[in-house]
Amino acid sequence: MPPEAFRLKSTAELDSVHRQLMHLQRTLRFLVLHANAKALQPTSDENRCAFATQLSRWLTLPPEACFYFSHPKKQDTVNHDIHTKLCHVSPSELSDGSGSGLPRLLINIITRACYDKGLKKLAGWRGMAPTPGDPESWTFKLKGHRGIFGVGCEGKRGDNEKQTARFLICHFPDTEDEELVELMSLHAATTANRPDYLEKVRDFACREEMREPFLMGHLNFSLGQDASHLLLCLESPLKKRVVALDGVRLPQGTEEDYLVPPGECEEDFPAFSLASVLFNAICAAVTYTLKTPPCFYRHAELPGQVVAYNAQGEITTQETDEWPLIRQTVGYGDLSSVLKASGPNLAGDTIWQEGETLPDTLPPVIWQAVTPDTALASLSTPLLDKRPQLIVLTGFLGSGKTTFINNFVEYHTSRNNFVAVVQNEIGETGLDGKLLEGNCNVVEIDEGCVCCTLAGQLSTGITELLGQFTPESIILETTGLANTFNLLDEIDELKELVRFDSVTTIVDCANALTTLETFDVARDQVRAADIVILNKTDLTGPEQTGAVEAKVRRLNAKTLILGTTHGNISPGLLYDDAVGCNDAAGPDASNPAPTHGHHVCHGEEGIGTLKIPLDHPLERKAFLTAIKELPPDILRVKGIVRFTDAEAVEVCQYVGGRIDLSRHTGPYDKEGFLIVIGRDIHNQPLPGVLYDAYHSTGRPVDGPHRPLFHRCACGHH
């Protein structure tokens, strides 16, 4: 690389690099110090304070952070098991005894645990994301809850014994969950119904109006300075109750019209039941990371508070035992000194310690997380299946499969799931893989059809894919001309590798009646489907949409039919995103019936392709004119084109007489191209600039275009 590549362009860049180097130096020094701590220990009491001060200067840390290195008794009691396992998760976060590293340590524990499919299913993790404005706050999704949980750091501190971080826990209900929204305060309910509600949820930690109304409780996360123990403590009211003493009148109502009657609760929100769901999931992640169950659990109920206000805005609070403040504590490691300092137990406390029988009232997931697969096997829910889900996605040319995949990937990315796409395109150069977005791996199979030319090779391809990646879901996107029946026999042989979910067929509602009437392949795609999605319903009226649905139903009476536009349909409606379940696909989806005999493929219907290289920009008007003059037997044109009137390349999509040009958003530095698909393709005339471009590369003016398929597994072409 040239020297200028290493030059810093601004003072800000220099400061950033300096901070990173200092952080790296601190981390390395800490690890070296930990490895040689006994050799470095002072031998007399009078030298320990000076030794801690010297270490703090060397590590650029507060003296109290280095305390346990300077004290032989403290060092002898280090719980190396806890410390070692936490170092595997986030070593640098343990080097500062002030507690500043605990937020990052906690989120690293959760992130690591969520990579285990069994733990995700057991604890109910569905997704998490950092808030844009505050690096120490996150939002979470949990199974069984439509709303969003928020966790944000409120403070950190450290002393000679432990370091602690305190987090607030919020819950932001789904606005469609009317029953839950009704229990919130009027301010919270009003906020939840504003158009920018979700936008504010994403950075709730920076917005005061998003914290207090949705606050459910607090989480304290403590780690002993000698790594002898780890504690998690939840504090949450059983219910958040706010009483309107004089009631709340309707803005436009009479004196007798109350939104909240006098003396009734404006807010009566079940705070603890929601906060404890997140707390249990976090504890399960800690248990999984430490590979050891808790040794201590306490459930204590303290006097709670009911807030009341009158019409003059005067606010009063009253203690109550009916709606207590609940404090749950879960501990790991040596807690003897901690328990002594916590004072006597109250009469109503539920306490469990290691060696005792686990009470039925304790949340079992916290203990089961040591071996989540074993725990799942003992439950009545389906056994965890670690094979990735396989969805076969098919649909005739231009039906909208790529758009559907983008929505599918976005859905799973938000839940921290990884998607692999095995993409088969008919043509020398694939386009759709260049249009996919999001967190997925795309394996393209060009120059052939996976249901035809490449039949018999799918097993090899998926084996190679699983050797490099561990996706939760695999989408096998077949070419628009594929006959799915020719693939099902081979899918039946992949049981050891994947868990077959369903065949999903996308139907272009605008052109479906003509397509289904004309092409056997299109009809077989519908016949083979477990799920049929009628796409582009915005281009058809109710009468045409109903006619298409009736046609599909005559071809496949058992399939699930759903309508949508732009492929925008939640995968949660189609597939069970909990790994190991596939109820949505129907009873036969997990065990496809082998289909013996021959099924028609596109070669038998005279359908072929050719590639037109575009080595220079085209005049836009001439290009559009040529597209409009394409003969009706040209079924689809797709590719990437450069025009003389624009710098950016554009994506061309032509199907059913409709042309769509859109700016290509990703990087692209190769020459343009078009893939033309049609019947009797070698005898179809190419109009205008398309003819010029095709023959400019030395292809023969007379004679057939070069066929795509050199052979077909069916033996017919």
Image: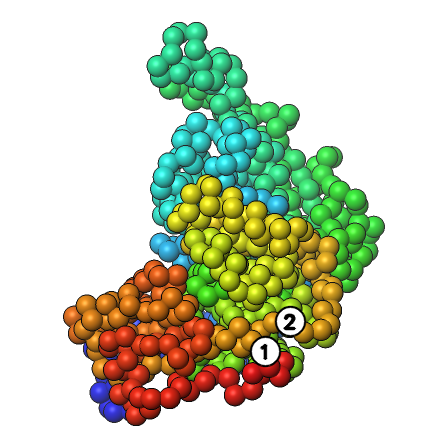
User: Would you say 110 lies left or right of 7 here?
Assistant: right
Q: Amino acid at mark 1?
A: Cys
Residue at point 41%, 14% (across, down): 249
Label 2 packing within 10 angstroms: few (<14), some (14-19), many (20+): some
Image mark for residue 627: none
Residue at point 73%, 35% (across, down): 348
User: Would you say 182 lies left or right of 8 here?
Assistant: right
Residue at point 75%, 56% (across, down): 382
Up-down relation of residue 43 to residue 558 (above or below):
below
Image mark for residue 599: 2
Q: What is the x, y in percent for residue 52?
A: 47, 71
Q: Amino acid at mark 2?
A: His
Residue 622 image-quadrant placement? bottom left
Residue at point 52%, 88% (across, down): 710
According to the image, label 1 marks what residue?
452
Q: What is the x, y in percent for residue 340?
A: 67, 50
Name of the residue lying farthest toward the left = 645
User: Would you say 118 lies left or right of 613 here?
Assistant: right
